[in-house]
Image: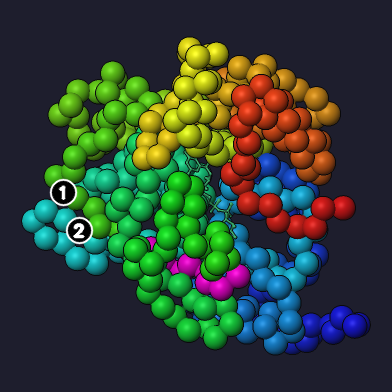
Amino acid sequence: MNKVEPSATGPSFVKSRVSLKQYNTFSFDYQAEYLAEVTSQNELSEALLWANSNHLPVTVLGGGSNLLICGDVSGLVIVNKLQGRALCESSQDYAVVEFAAGEVWHQCVEWAVMQGLGGIENLALIPGSAGAAPVQNIGAYGVEIKDTLLSVCVVDRRSLELLELNAEQCGFGYRDSLFKTDWKDRYIITSIKLKLSKHPELALSYGGLGNLLDADASIKEVFDCVCKIRKEKLPDPNVLPNSGSFFKNPIVTHEHYSRLKGAYPNIVAFEQEGGWKLAAGWLNDRAGWRGYTDQGVGVYEKQALVLVNFECSKADALLDLEAKIQRSVEELFNVTLEREPVLIGQAQ
Ligand SMILES: Cc1cc2nc3c(=O)[nH]c(=O)nc-3n(C[C@H](O)[C@H](O)[C@H](O)COP(=O)(O)OP(=O)(O)OC[C@H]3O[C@@H](n4cnc5c(N)ncnc54)[C@H](O)[C@@H]3O)c2cc1C
């Protein structure tokens, strides 16, 4: 069937043939057929209406920090730039805050911390937008966004209906939610509501926080400590393009873990219901990948879980490297590594 050309009378903020280089933290240079940066609900509805009436697929982006773009993206790319932070409710113990989806997540965390509101300070310096935070249920230092999330406001891509979904409806799991699976092509998140505590219990048992902080540390001290550790450990995507952790930490059975522990007594793992979560960074490191470079891409020298792009404009070399790492980890540990960033674009 011949493709119908989109109506020429589309919204003025829709641009055609736009490079996505500045819209993904790997800095891969592919094109969006159409791209719209939306700054209001009206613009979002207008963009969706136009895409729907022209039968164009829609891809939504925030900060592009959890993406692996591997080809040009057909249809309309909507970059969510909706802004706004609000204190919706406040009691003696709690406050409910709402962040528009296009807000920079780290700035939301800082804003909450400055108001003495706790619960998300461990999630400081995670790049990207507030709206994408529930998509993979962002987590760091023993805290996940689902722990404080009350609800998510969304627009239905087809009907343009606005809905508020409770956190329990979102099917949160480890780096997962229904927004990544069943609802991938259904909803666009417009804002999120969190319930933050005025007397939070600090989560200091992960990532060495407990060794660096007193048990009665303030929320601000935890925030500062997390920022300091992350700056030391992780590459800044503005300096060295990357998407943070490239692989999810794999979960294995008790039996599998016992065998691995026998062979590798120093293996890093955390027990959890039904099995053990292995540190994928440790597996990659043990398999010899830390500091590896080839064809303009590589594995970060301080953290083997982070793949970096030194100089490539396309994703082929990175996809090759991913496959090599997965094969070697499978062979050595009989463990399958699953990619964390979302793949978009058509591979050429
Ligand atoms: C240096 C570095 C460190 C990182 N550290 C962590 C970490 O500690 N923990 C962690 O969990 N993650 C981490 N990440 C990954 C990333 O920052 C998070 O996943 C973040 O939430 C992605 O936000 P984004 O706005 O960049 O999303 P994008 O990359 O733009 O999009 C990611 C996915 O969400 C979808 N999406 C985006 N916005 C919306 C919306 N409004 N509605 C519906 N779907 C949407 C997209 O379609 C895509 O599928 C790190 C990344 C980097 C580069």
Work out whether residue 325 can be spotted.
no
Can you identify the residue that label 1 sits on?
Answer: 198
* Residue that sits furthest to the right in the current view: 2
Name the quadrant of the N terminus. Answer: bottom right
Q: Which residues are magenta?
A: 185-193
Q: Is residue 291 left or right of residue 95?
A: right
Q: Is residue 289 above or below residue 51?
A: above
Q: Within the image, what quadrant is residue 307 found in?
A: top right
Q: Position of residue 6 (x, y in %)?
A: 79, 82
Q: In this orientation, which residue lies closer to the viewer: 309 or 156?
A: 156
Residue contact at pointers 2 and 1, CB within 8 angstroms: yes
Which residue is at 35% across, 63% downward? 167
- Neighbor class of circle 2 (other Cα within 10 Å; few <14, some 14-19, many 20+) is some
Kind of residue at disc 1: Lys
Can you identify the residue that label 2 sits on?
Answer: 95
Q: Is residue 318 above or below residue 304?
A: below
Tell whether position 330 is magenta. Answer: no
Q: Position of residue 287 (x, y in %)?
A: 65, 19
Q: Position of residue 83 (x, y in %)?
A: 44, 64
Q: CA distance from mark 2 to mark 1?
A: 7 Å
